[in-house]
Image (cartoon, helix red, strand yellow):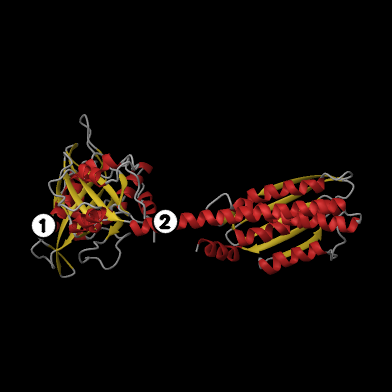
Amino acid sequence: MSTLSDLVYAQGRSTEADVEWLHRLAGDGQLLADLAFADIVVWVPTPDDSFIAVAHTRPSGAATLFYRDIVGDLVRPQWRTQVREAFTRGEIVDSASPDWFEETPTRVRAVPIVRERGVAGHPPRIIGVLTRHTNLGEARTPSRQQITFIECADELSGMVASADFPDLAAPTSPRRGAPRASDGLIRIDVDGVTTFASPNALSAFNRLGFEDELEGESLLEVATGILPKGREFDESLPIVMAGRAPWRADLEARGVTVSLRTIPLKQNGHRIGAIVLCRDVTEIRHQEQELITKDATIREIHHRVKNNLQTVASLLRIQSRRTHSDEARDALTHAMRRVAAIAVVHDTLSEGLAQNVDFDDVFDRVLKLIAEVAASPNTRARTLKTGTFGTLPSEYATPLALALTELVTNAVEHGLVDQEGEVEIIAERTADRLDVKVRDTGVGLPEGQVGRGLGTQIVRTLIQGELSGSIDWHTMVGSGTEVTIEIPMRYLARGEARSRD
């Protein structure tokens, strides 16, 4: 399905600022739908003088009219005149009589989406139309809460038609724990006094320790009385509770956390009150804290593993310096380098929350370890990395780092022994696979003959066994050896998915 941006840009009439405005409005589509007990559809004009739906939200507390998503559909003939009139005149247009949709009586309200008010004789900038489709088939005597919700929906509709809503200065809604109309709604007047509080909103404040009725009370004074003495609180809380700015804050007391969101209500550009949405997010905040604690613990584990591996690498280095056997010294040096390469991966993981690593950063650090080999008395080797590896899950970063460490080390020690040359690592990542080439300008290998040492065995095991990839050695035309590694991208993608889970 096409995104809102795709659909809007396809019409060729909107700017990036227009798209951002429509995104914000569509983001509050659920709020508008729940307050109006109606389906909300956002339309933008098409080049052929029609309108196309770019967003659709169903009400959570009422029956929907559209059982199939209508995003991407052109406006139906029975709504076209009303939608065009709202767009042309810049005024809210209500259906004159019940509109029948699939044998269901409905009421349609068309609201112009005004991006900029008209000034100094210039007309307002209208970028689309919002329609509200109310199902009249289930009409019943409305409760006081329903009446208040619909009044709030009407006021917000008027703000959409006067460029007062959405407010781009307001923070975007978090997906997890954002308060909704059904979670609790408080209506306050221009002085911050509560004129209506839904049962869920009252229950949330009761859990915070407020035992009286909210209506008739200053919401800011209520919050001040709830807060524990001497405890620091969110600096934006007074602004939120007074309804003066479209902001968010958390109210905490008695082990309960209530998330608050304020939407100032305006008429002709003047503030007339506000809607305060509230939701008990105590359990969500506890879960978030547990995740933060677990993330911190995981990072600490990676940090300690890195320290332990570095200690092991140091012991191997000391041991290699004290041994009198050249063969034993080389074996200990290689083991030290392998351990140090693994330590680099754990060090990178200890610095962030994700279990994915920027492998380009990891490999740049690994190359510095290999520089010790390049600095041998009779060998002068330069290492060069081109291309991008991208982000890899940690369980695949470790074997790849080890394999490349072995390949570059072998290229320096055997391909460039006692001479000057270059080792180039070329990475190319596509949607299907990751290709890596390790190319040196050394003496090269006899074609078809691959080393049988421990390093070669390690590389084969890591690439073929752990990464399900392939590896090939061959001599380049002229001189030098090129090792080609191919790792299927779908395999890495599965690893990334498991890492996120």
- Residue 345 in the image: x percent, y percent? 64, 54
**300 or 260, which is in the foreground?**
300
Using a 10 Å C-alpha cutoff, classify the residue at mark 1 as few (fewer than 14 neighbours), some (14 to 19) or many (20 or more). Answer: few
Question: In the image, 306: left or right of 379?
Answer: left
Q: Earlier in the sequence, mark 1 or mark 2?
A: 1
Q: Nearer the viewer, mark 1 or mark 2?
A: 2
**Which residue position holds label 1?**
144
Residue 42: horizontal and vertical position, in percent? 27, 53
> The N terminus is located in which quarter?
bottom left
Which of the two residues, 435 or 229, is positioned nearer the viewer here?
229
Q: Look at the image and tell me whether residue 420 can be seen.
A: yes
Q: Residue at x 26, y 62 (%)?
A: 58
Q: Up-down: is 379 above or below 142?
A: above
Work out which residue is located at the far front of the displayed protein and give it.
229
Q: Is residue 388 visible?
A: no
Alpha carbon separation for disc pair 1 and 2:
36 Å
The residue at the far top in this view is 120
Q: Secondary structure at mark 2?
A: helix
Image position, residue 77 (x, y; %): 20, 60
Answer left or right for 452 relative to 91.
Answer: right
Could you say which quadrant of the image residue 323 lies in? bottom right
Name the amino acid, label 1.
Answer: Arg
From the top left corner, tell me how far across and down residue 240 is, in percent.
27, 43
User: Which residue is label 2 attached to?
Assistant: 288
Q: Is residue 165 above or below residue 287?
A: above
User: Could you say which disc has been placed on residue 108 in the image?
Assistant: none
Query: At numbered mark 1, what does the secondary structure look like: helix, strand or loop?
Result: helix
Location of residue 7 (image quadrant): bottom left
Q: Nearer the viewer, residue 34 or 249?
A: 249
- Residue visible at 46% across and 57% down? 291
